[in-house]
Image (cartoon, grey):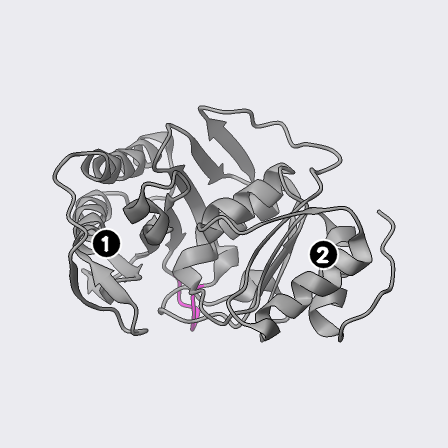
Amino acid sequence: MVRNGMNRDFEARIILCINSVLNYLRSCGVSNNVVGFNMFGDASKEFDLVAEDILVNCIVKALNDVLIVGEERGVRKYGRGEWVAVIDPVDGSTNFDAGIPWSSISVALARGTSKSHITLKDVVLAIVAEIFRDRIYIYRNGSVEVIGGRSARRSPPRPVLLSYFETPNSYKPVENYMLMRGRVALRSLGSAALDIVYVGLGNAEGFIDVRSKLRNVDVAAALKIALAMGARAHICNTNDVTDVQLDNLIKVECVVVGYDDVYLAKLMEAVQKPLSSAKFVS
């Protein structure tokens, strides 16, 4: 049981929990049968539920007193809830099911407080682990470590925009930005958590999602990591991105992440205005 805060032994136990999920997802016993629907009406496949149960059971053993906020089974409290664990065991489950190697596991941990709500600023450990290769991104003590890959931040960032769009309205900000920005590659990859981390690393200059489909479990760990690397972000209906609530399962109307303040300002301009041919010189 952990009582006095964060330490490397504690972190190692959480990574072991993540590795347990990875071992399952990389095994031959994974089933993609649809077994129900989560609270937002999305289909839950068997591997989604099994992965979440493995992660939850392991975290509960490590922390004992914890409030779990999960995508599939919602909010569950164990003991007094001295910790808050925001988890997404398979971010990019469509990719995972299709064998497309762009999906991840996300865990964000915050210490329970007397505040009315736990928010992103309370997170003390954030981990995003890639499922298809051995690469883990870890936030702790204000800095980020990359295990299995380069941790140096690219400067300037690669001219790549990451986004998701399923309707004309959700594509408009992308079209705006590309008209303003000029030559930039557009990619829609399938794991918002990895996309946001990649903006932090400078592997992309921005991320836009205005579909109102993402939840706090999808982005909490990745935002903590990206912000610590120097990225800047905006979440709709929140003045400060670090104020996004984590102790309940909530939908976020939009998420915009820029490599730095300059890129975020241009991305927000694209999100907030009608189609324009205005030019953006980086």
State the mark number for residue 136. none
Give, as a three-letter code, the residue at label 1. Asp
Indicate the position of residue 12 as horizontal and vertical percent values: 31, 31
Residue 104: quarter of image: top left
The one of 228 and 183 positioned closer to us in this rendering: 183
Q: Quadrant of the N terminus?
A: top left
Between 63 and 202, the one lying in front of the other is: 202
The residue that appears at 64% across and 71% down in the rendered structure is 239
Q: What amino acid is at disc 2?
A: Leu
Give the dominant element type of the magenta stretch: helix, strand or loop: loop
For mark 1, give the secondary structure: helix
Crowd rating for badge 2 (residues with CA inside 10 Å; few <14, some 14–19, many 20+): many
Residue 52 on the magenta span: no
Which residue bears the numbered disc 2?
A: 264
Is residue 164 shown left or right of residue 31?
Answer: right
The x, y position of residue 133, in whole percent, is 37, 30
Magenta residue span: 113-118
Q: Are marks 2 and 1 in contact (CB under 8 Å)?
A: no
Q: In the figure, 114 relative to 181: above or below?
A: below
**For residue 33, side relative to residue 218 (left or right):** left
Q: Earlier in the sequence, mark 2 or mark 1?
A: 1
**Spot occupied by residue 73 in the image (x, y as percentages of width and height):** 22, 64
Viewer-proximal residue, 257 or 123? 257
Quadrant for residue 270, please give it.
bottom right
Q: Is residue 222 visible?
A: yes
Residue at the image position 74 percent from the left and 56 percent from the top? 178
Q: Secondary structure at mark 2?
A: helix
Q: Position of residue 149 (x, y in %)?
A: 50, 25
Lateral position of residue 125 relative to residue 207, left or right: left
Name the residue that disc number 1 marks: 48
Name the one closer to the observer, 180 or 251. Answer: 180
Task: Name the residue rendered at 19%, 60% in the picture.
Answer: 78
